[in-house]
Image (cartoon, helix red, strand yellow):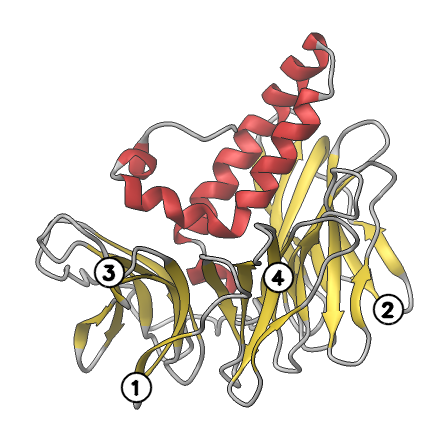
Amino acid sequence: MHRPKGGIHERSGAQEEVKVRIESLLMSQQQRVGRQTERGRRRVRARFGAVVGTLVAMLMVGSVMLAPAARAEAAAPASASRIATMTDLGTLGGSFSIGLAVNARGQVAGQSDPGDGNYHAFLWTPSGGMQDLGTLGGPTGQAGAINARGQVTGYADTAGGARHAFLWTPSGGMQDLGTLGGPTSVGSAINARGQVTGFAGTPGGARHAFRWTAPGGMQDLGTLGGPTSSGFAINARGQVAGQSDPGDGNYHAFRWTPSGGMQDLGTLGGPFSSGFAINARGQVTGFADTPDGAARAFLWTAPGGMQDLGTLGGPNSQALGINVRGQVTGLAETAGGAFHAFLWTP
């Protein structure tokens, strides 16, 4: 599996876990590269190395940008008279901390070293500073998403050594969301209603996307026919976007709805696609392969299906966020081989 080197990626083994939202993307990329000729592998690595490296970096700290509940809200413009500042949020007692998500109230969720060599999830608020959210009895935890109510999701170790998704609320503390019968689960995104999506292990050793709700608990969202699925984003209507194995060893983007279940969003003619974000209208964005092996940002809508959003002159692009107007952002390759942020407007 390709993993970028250097920078914060080598800070500690715990930081490797931040890749949760793109773990399946990297796996897919490796599988695709493995099917190429040696010449093709060199070409794919050259094209995608920078894309994946940038994507890892963005998702390591990029929940700040992508609004992880549904990645659908646009930030308010800064006042012309306001001076921008960078605030040191401190640590939990050790030497390291990283912010992974921020809500509209300026509350930050992430992970920090409490000084004992482990890493804990934290919530930072302007009024209260950095709060240790603890774990589920084990040594390690990480907060990866936060909603407007200050509710947080991520994962934490249990006393028995398993890793489980959690929901932390100001009133109830850290709640174990359980699994789908297997040993592991991870919360990837949370919506305004406190519903969580991510992935969880099954009794047979598979990994399935889930949606957790307070009344219903953890619900298995199934797959597109293969053994694996992961939920990456959830909107206020409880609709989930992610990716799943349709049974041929590839991955396709999906949209899951309470009324319709899991829908295969297809590709752009190639074998792979992945849904990274969903807005309040149920529109999904992410990336999909073309027949010539390029990766392209897409917008999927119920009436129009999957639309190729193009590039900035190069062969590749990836979409990472979408707002309620259907505007999409991400990164795209230029004719010169650089990767630039883009805003696509319908």
In front: label 4 or label 3 = 3
Mark 4 Cα within 10 Å, few/some/many (few <14, many 20+)?
A: many
Of the residues shown, which amino acid type is indicated by label 1? Pro
3D distance between C-alphas at marks 2 and 1: 37 Å
x and y percent of residue 287 in the render? 70, 46
Residue in the foreground of this view, choosing between 7 and 113:
113
| Nearest to N terminus: mark 4 or mark 3 | 3
Of the residues shown, which amino acid type is indicated by label 4? Ala
Task: Please name the residue shown 90% across and 63% down the image.
Answer: 304
Residue in the foreground of this view, choosing between 17 and 67:
17
Mark linked to residue 170: 1
x and y percent of residue 253 in the render? 73, 53
| Nearest to N terminus: mark 1 or mark 4 | 1
Report the residue marked by disc 2. Answer: 302
3D distance between C-alphas at marks 3 and 1: 21 Å
Of the residues shown, which amino acid type is indicated by label 2? Ala
Task: Please name the residue shown 8% across and 54% down the image.
Answer: 115
Are the residues at dot 2 and dot 1 in contact (C-beta closer than 8 Å)? Answer: no
Are the residues at dot 1 and dot 4 in contact (C-beta closer than 8 Å)? Answer: no
3D distance between C-alphas at marks 1 and 4: 26 Å
Q: Secondary structure at mark 1?
A: loop
Of the residues shown, which amino acid type is indicated by label 3? Gly
Report the residue marked by disc 3. Answer: 138
